Image: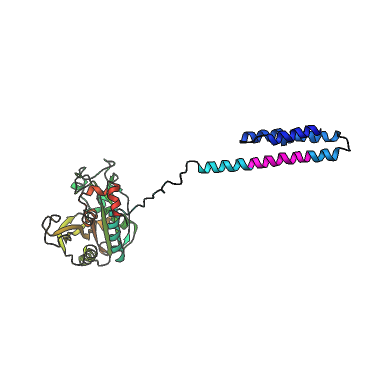
């Protein structure tokens, strides 16, 4: 018995545990309940009572040796494994990863400025869908059924052949006026910024999508003088205090009277340059008094209420402000161009 214990002790000490598989083999051979050590403990019963304490002690030592070896091997393997996996693939000498922060698109910068000016004057912001019903884009805005603006050449129709419920890409932001008037009771004072679409020949000066900012004010006794004062105040803040305005009579089906507004060219100060084609003026918007038919279409009594509306293009101002010479650059999302507008 003593001899067997000593042999086992020797074997255990010499057992090499280098991997998880060795560890498992060691455990199964020696330390489990049906292992060799437990078997020797089982034989203790038949040992001469006089030898029992000594043999018992030897067996306990054997068990301690095996347990200690097992614990030591477990810890050693666990620590080498975790350190090797956490080091795997990491080169601490590599430079850090660069994070690119985005920047506001130039169109959004200019739109943001415009929104700020109008919100300071008490205008709220309304939005509407870019996929619009032709009734909102045209009929409700008092366009006659045969108006040329409905022509396929100008409008991107998504469905066709169901007058009134056809779906199209809105050609201006004015349908948002209709939605707001149907939705809210006067007094109403909102601006509606957004994208609009027209099927036009693409060039450095015109694109099939661009941005407009619409304004609508409906209250009691709103006059053309109110419209002029609002536009004037806006233009001074947006284009500079020296700016002069010119209102030219014009026509829109949804306003009467209507006008187009020019500002003195803020590049040459009105002297005449390439951008203003030597005229000294730049056209910035269309405007007018909301047509009584439009009010009636939207359930607002034109005898009781009156209002003005205006709609301006945003992209032209962006091009001039940042000296960009091709409108297409605003829509291509070329990072080389966008990065120039970082904060
Ligand atoms: N919707 C018109 C356009 O796109 C602009 C406009 C808006 C004119 C509001 C008058 C009033 O040309």
Q: Using the image, determine if residue 215 lies above or below residue 85.
A: below
The picture places residue 85, in percent across and down from the top left corner, at 53, 41
Q: Is residue 83 left or right of residue 134?
A: right
Residue stretch rendered in magenta on the structure: 59-74
Q: Residue at x 58, y 41 (%)?
A: 80
In the image, 238: left or right of 2? left
Q: How many marks?
A: 0
Query: Splitting the image into four quadrants, where does ligand 1 fall?
Result: bottom left
The correct choice, above or below, for 160 with respect to 259 in the image is above
On the question of residue 333 being in view, the answer is no
Quadrant (top left/top right/bottom left/bottom right) for the N terminus: top right
7 left or right, relative to 334: right
Q: Where residue 165 appears, x then y in whole percent?
A: 30, 45
Residue 145 falls left or right of residue 1: left
Q: Quadrant of the C terminus?
A: bottom left
| Residue 32 image offset from top left, x and y in percent | 72, 36
Where does residue 285 sit, x and y in percent of width and height?
A: 20, 57
Asked if the stretch drawn in magenta spans residue 233, the answer is no
28 or 331: nearer the viewer: 28
| Residue 306 visible in the current orientation | yes
In terms of depth relative to the viewer, which is nearer, 235 or 310? 235
Quadrant position of residue 56: top right
Q: Nearer the viewer, residue 159 or 73?
A: 73
Question: Residue 183 occupies which quadrant of the picture?
Answer: bottom left
Q: How is the image coloured?
A: rainbow
Secondary structure mostly seen in the magenta stretch: helix
* Residue 82 in the image: above or below residue 287: above
């Amino acid at each position: 018995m003593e001899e067997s214990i000593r042999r086992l002790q020797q074997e255990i000490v010499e057992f090499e545990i280098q991997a998880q598989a060795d560890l498992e083999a060691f455990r199964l051979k020696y330390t489990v309940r049906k292992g060799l050590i437990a078997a020797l403990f089982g034989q203790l019963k038949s040992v001469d009572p006089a030898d029992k304490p000594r043999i018992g002690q030897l067996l306990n030592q054997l068990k301690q040796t095996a347990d200690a070896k097992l614990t030591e091997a477990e810890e050693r393997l666990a620590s080498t494994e975790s350190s090797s996996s956490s080091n795997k693939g990491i080169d601490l000498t590599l430079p850090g990863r660069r994070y690119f922060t985005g920047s506001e698109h130039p169109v959004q910068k200019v739109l943001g400025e415009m929104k700020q000016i109008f919100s300071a004057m008490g205008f709220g912001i309304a939005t509407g869908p870019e996929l619009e019903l032709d009734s909102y884009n045209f009929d409700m805005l008092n366009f006659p059924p045969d108006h040329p603006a409905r022509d396929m050449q100008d409008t991107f129709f998504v469905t066709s052949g169901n007058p009134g419920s056809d779906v199209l890409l809105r050609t201006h932001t004015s349908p948002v006026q209709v939605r707001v008037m149907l939705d809210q009771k006067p007094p109403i004072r909102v601006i509606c910024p957004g994208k609009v679409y027209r099927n036009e020949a693409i060039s450095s000066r015109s694109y099939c999508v661009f941005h407009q900012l619409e304004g609508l004010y409906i209250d009691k006794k709103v006059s053309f003088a109110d419209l002029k004062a609002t536009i004037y105040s806006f233009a001074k803040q947006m284009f500079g205090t020296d700016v002069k305005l010119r209102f030219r009579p014009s026509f829109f089906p949804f306003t009467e009277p209507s006008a187009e507004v020019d500002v003195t060219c803020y590049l040459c100060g009105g002297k005449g340059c390439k951008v203003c084609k030597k005229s000294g003026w730049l056209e910035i918007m269309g405007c007018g008094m909301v047509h009584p038919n439009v009010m009636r279409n939207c359930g607002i009594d034109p005898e009781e209420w009156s209002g003005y509306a205006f709609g301006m293009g945003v992209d032209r101002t962006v091009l001039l402000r940042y000296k960009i010479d091709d409108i297409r650059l605003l829509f291509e999302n070329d990072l080389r161009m966008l990065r120039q507008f970082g904060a």
